[in-house]
Amino acid sequence: MNIKSIRSEEDLAAALARMEQLWGAEIGTPEGNELDALASLIEMYEAKHYPMPPGRSHRDH
């Protein structure tokens, strides 16, 4: 497992590609832990760089 911070669009693309490879990994396995960590990093990056407008959520659609 080699997890790095996501600081650029290139880092994001690499993290998303790795996440796709790990998709379906069992919880508690090294792969599952890596998937969970990547999901958190991606979520933080996207929240900072692609914020949702105030007062809207995915449930509004």
Image: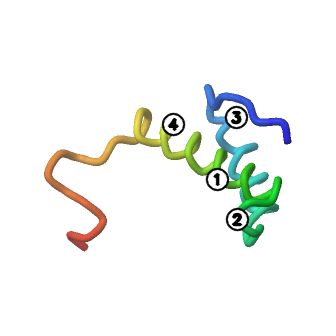
Residue 45 marker: 4
**Marks 4 & 3, CB-CB < 8 Å contact:** yes
Report the number of numbered marks.
4
Q: Could you tell me how far apart the alpha carbons at marks 2 and 4 are, in whole angstroms?
A: 23 Å
Q: Are marks 2 and 4 in contact (CB under 8 Å)?
A: no
Whichever of labels 1 and 2 marks the residue nearer the N terminus, that label is 2
Q: Which numbered disc, 4 or 1, marks the residue that appears first in the sequence? A: 1
| Mark 1 and mark 2: Cα distance apart in space | 8 Å
Badges 1 and 2: C-beta atoms under 8 Å apart? yes
Q: Earlier in the sequence, mark 2 or mark 4?
A: 2
Q: Amino acid at mark 2?
A: Ile
- Secondary structure of the residue carrying tag 1 is helix
Indicate which label's residue lies in the foreground, 1 or 3: 1
What residue is shown with label 2?
27
Name the residue that disc number 3 marks. 11
SS at mark 2 in the image: loop
Q: Which residue is mark 1?
A: 36
Q: Earlier in the sequence, mark 3 or mark 2?
A: 3
Eyeballing the image, is 8 above or below 42? above
